[in-house]
């Protein structure tokens, strides 16, 4: 397979992550955990970035559904500590403006933060937490959880005892959802109830551990193609795995010239470009680390990101 990995002209990130392809805007949204949001404009082949006054840590960015434009601003849901805040940004300016807080989780767990989130195929919010890296060994305490939020209804815990809540991907046709807790070194599958959004019948799709131990990388980001195959990033592993979820077989390894490979999403006009974020932290001598990449020639297509209802 003659796929090609290329760097997109982009700012270096400390830990770039959370790819969301917005079909309407023909743009990829992502963020740096260290307080920056980005928009890659496909037509311009250019990345715009913004910061938010008073917010040094951002867990994710997801465009908000059914918003009415106020002047030049669009709305985005951002992970701000244990809060999900609504932020206004025109996609160009260097400053975004924080608006209302949609909800907050884990009151009293001041050392926890949101780490990753996505909308399911009907627009429900799913996001998970972790204990801050500043508190010590990430393998020490499973202090996080995965939550579902339904606007006008509330917040529900879906999965608990989580170390680092990370990748999510849905197979809408088969009513399945896939989920990664990075420190468990695997990808899990659940039955997904479209009506309620609940998860059930947990099953391990693929276990990357070596005799139950750290394989030298953490599974991190996750997306799915229209054939139902998964794409799992290897944080500290410089690659992406293409996995057939029914058998757990690795179909392809895509090398990425950066150690910290974080998130993936299909995008582009034909949804056949795999976008990849990376981080430069602890990889100072690699000129590619922290940049945005694209993989073309994979011969598959994916799904656009779903705007979230918050």
Image (tube, helix red, strand yellow):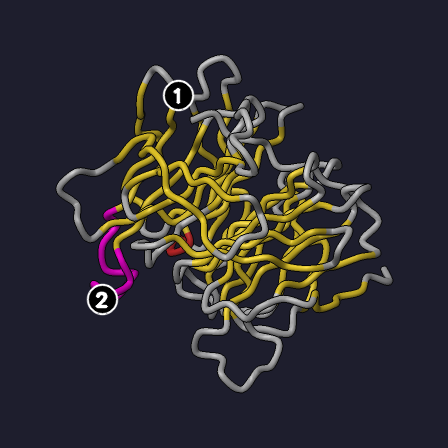
Q: Is residue 109 left or right of residue 227?
A: left
Q: Is residue 148 left or right of residue 17?
A: left
Residue 22 is covered by the magenta coloring:
no
Residue in the image at 54% along x and 26% along y: 65
Q: Secondary structure at mark 1?
A: strand
SS assignment for the magenta stretch, majority = loop
> Residue 78, percent across and down?
41, 43
Q: Secondary structure at mark 2?
A: loop
Residue in the image at 51% along x and 30% along y: 70
Question: Alpha-carbon neighbours of circle 2 within 10 Å: few (<14), some, or many (≥20)?
Answer: few
> Residue 6, percent across and down?
74, 67
The vertical placement of 79 against 122, above or below, is: below
Residue 136, numbered label = 2
- Can you name the residue that lies furthest to the top here? 195
Question: Which image quadrant: the C terminus?
Answer: top left
Magenta range = 132-143
> Residue 105, percent across and down?
25, 36
Q: Earlier in the sequence, mark 1 or mark 2?
A: 2
Whether residue 220 appears in this view of the structure is no
Residue 133 is covered by the magenta coloring:
yes
In this rendered view, identify the residue nearer to me: 162 or 261. 261
């Amino acid at each position: 397979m003659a796929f090609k990995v290329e760097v997109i002209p982009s700012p270096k990130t400390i830990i770039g992550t959370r790819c969301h392809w917005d079909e309407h805007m023909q743009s990829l949204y992502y963020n740096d955990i260290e307080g920056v949001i980005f928009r890659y404009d496909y037509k311009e082949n250019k990345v715009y970035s913004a910061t938010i006054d008073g917010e040094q840590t951002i867990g994710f960015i997801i465009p908000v559904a059914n918003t009415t434009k106020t002047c030049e601003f669009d709305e985005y849901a951002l992970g701000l500590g244990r809060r999900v805040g609504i932020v206004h940004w025109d996609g160009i300016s260097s400053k975004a403006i924080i608006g209302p807080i949609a909800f907050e989780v884990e009151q009293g767990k001041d050392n926890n933060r949101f780490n990753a989130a996505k909308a399911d195929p009907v627009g429900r919010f799913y996001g998970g937490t972790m204990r801050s890296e500043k508190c010590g060994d990430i393998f020490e305490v499973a202090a996080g959880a995965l939550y579902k939020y339904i606007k006008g209804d509330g917040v529900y815990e879906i999965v608990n005892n989580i170390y680092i809540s990370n990748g999510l991907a849905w197979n809408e046709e088969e009513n399945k959802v896939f989920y990664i807790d990075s420190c468990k070194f695997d990808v899990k599958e659940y039955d997904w109830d479209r009506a309620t959004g609940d998860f059930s019948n947990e099953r391990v799709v693929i276990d990357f551990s070596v005799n139950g131990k750290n394989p030298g990388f953490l599974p991190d980001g996750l997306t799915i193609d229209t054939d139902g195959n998964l794409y799992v990033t290897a944080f500290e592993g410089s690659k992406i795995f293409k996995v057939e979820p029914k058998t757990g077989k690795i179909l392809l390894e895509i090398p990425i010239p950066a150690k910290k490979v974080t998130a993936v999403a299909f995008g582009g006009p034909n949804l056949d470009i795999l976008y990849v974020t990376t981080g430069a932290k602890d990889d100072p001598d690699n000129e590619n680390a922290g940049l945005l990449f694209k993989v073309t020639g994979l011969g598959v297509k994916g799904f656009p990101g779903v705007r979230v209802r918050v």
